[in-house]
Each structure stands twice: as structure tokens, then as C-alpha cells.
Image (cartoon, rainbow, N blue to C red):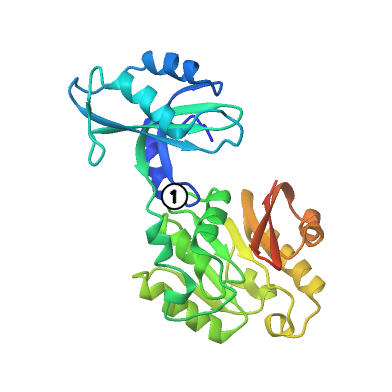
Amino acid sequence: MVVDVEDEKINRLADRVALSFFLDKFLFSCEPDLSEIRKKSEKIEIPVNKGSSFRVRCNNRSRHVEFSSLDVEREVGDIFARNYRVDLKKPDFEVRIILTDNRVYGGIKLFEIDRKSFEKRKAQYRPFFSPISLDPKLARALVNLSEVGRDGVLLDPFCGTGGILLEAVLIGARVIGSDISRKMIEGCRKNLEYFGINKYELYQCDVGDVSKFVENVDAVVTDFPYGRSTSTSGEKIEILYDRGAEVICKVLKSDGKAVVGLPNEKSLGILDGYLEREVVYPCRVHRSLTRYFGVYKKG
């Protein structure tokens, strides 16, 4: 993905993204042709002193091109070696090439995303465990889709073990969670405090009562219950979803966004009566389960 980002926002972006491996400064794009890659590389000017060290890495995502990552690394490396020293272990800068069947993208690595930190926050490493907790990377992606800013207020009205709240706090948001289960609320509290988080609001209440405690939030991010009687207290799932959608609309500020997970795309239609749907992302959780995440905006 190529996006235009102001320099002063790069660090902030690197702190938030979860499903990426690297952030690079874009240098060029061309057709997947070795001679074109060579021509583009020869025109690159890097704002570092001559004699600085470099390395080239090529990520080959193509299926049909007739040359390899090693071919690209050699071609580009030979060009940069005219002015810079090769250092494969600790270079001053790294040239990264992404090779696809349709395009080639070249850039300078700015950040490598710390994906290990997400692994440490997986459900099995928290003091309170539930097998239905979202993966931390997915939870962070949902928070990012809500576009909540630093110091913005984010609500999860079905907070469960607190995975979404945890990722929201870590990007600087203020968080509010609610759940009908006292066990979940206490477990959520344990998980948040285990990671050093002590500024939050938690309420044990039915989703229909959330508006008694919360109003005018910047974003709502939640994964609705799957529909088992244990997670809905015996209530028909369609009724619960409709009440949840009504409350989300009620507490969300104008122009605020809601990102919600539901078991099928049909269920997302329940929210269409309350909010404007922007996009839907299907997400395969495991072999027998696909969740659908809808992004909505309050007009």
C-alpha cells in the first residue's frame, strides 16, 4: 500500500499499525522488468553521506516473473555499491524492493513494526483467559479503522476480556468498557492492570443501559456476542443486535465511527437502520469461523 503521509506523522503511524511488517519511504514504481528496475534505481538520490553502508532486500510476491529476488538484489546492489559500502548486518540504510506480478515498488526502510509486542498480548498470556478473545493484531486493526485519535474516547459495549480496550489504550485513547457479565468485567480489569493500565472506565450492565453511563464518545469498537445462550443471557440474538445498534447510535457523537464484528454479513444490516455503512471486511478467524467487520459513520 502506498499512501501520502506528512513527515511529522510517520512516527505516529508506526506506533499504530499492526498488520504491516515495515514502513518505507517510497522511491519508485515500475513494471516488473529487471531493466526498468535498474533504470529507476540509477536515478535514486539518498540523502546520506557517500561511504555510508547499505543493503538491499527484495520481497518477491509474484508468481509469474522470470527473475528472482536475488537477481533484483544484485542489480540494485551493484548500483548502490558505486557510492556506498555493503553491510548485510547493520547497514546505515536499507533499500527494500517489493516485487509483484503487476508492479515493482522501491523504498527506503523507515520502521520495522514490532510484531513481537502483539504476540506478548495474546489471550493465553493474560491473567484472565477466554478462547473467544480477538487476536491483538486484529483488535488493533479494528481500533485503527475507527480513526480514534490520541485522547479520543472509545467505547466497547461488549468488552469481554478487554482486548480491544487494551489496544486502544496503547495508541493513546481513553477507554470505556461494559459487559453484562461480572466475571468478564473483573477479568477485563485484571488484564488491563496486568499491562500497567489504570485509567479506564468499566461498567457491569446490560447493553441497553450503557447510555445511562456513557455519552458522546468518539468511537465505538466491539465484537458482538456470537449468539450462544451463554453470551446472550438467553435473549434472541437478533433482538440483542438491534438493541446494541440502537445504543451505539445513541452514544456515538456526530461524525463518529463505529467498527463492529458480527457472525455474518446479513447481521450487519441491522446497523444500517441507525448508521451509515462505509465498508465491510470479512475476516477468517479459523477454518470454521469467518467474522464480518463493518465500519459505520454517524451522520
| Residue at the (48%, 81%) spot, across then down | 187
Q: Is residue 238 above or below residue 258?
A: below
Q: Is residue 190 above or below residue 221?
A: below
Quarter of the image for residue 205 reads bottom right
Q: Is residue 279 above or below residue 153?
A: above
Instruction: Report crowding for label 1: few under 14, some 14 to 19, many 20 or more residues within 10 A (C-alpha).
Output: some
Decide if residue 200 is on the left or right side of residue 236: left
The residue to which callout 1 is attached is 16
| Between 24 and 188, the one nearer to me in the picture | 24
Q: Residue 46, can we see it? A: no
Q: Residue lying farthest front?
A: 66
* Residue 174 rendering spot, x and y as whole percentages: 45, 60
| Residue at the (54%, 36%) spot, across then down | 1
Q: Residue 220, can we see it? A: yes
| Residue at the (44%, 27%) spot, across then down | 106
* Residue 127 rendering spot, x and y as whole percentages: 42, 81
Counting labels gives 1
| Residue at the (61%, 32%) spot, across then down | 64
Decide if residue 130 is on the left or right side of residue 167: right
* Residue 242 rendering spot, x and y as whole percentages: 78, 67
**Mark 1 element type:** helix
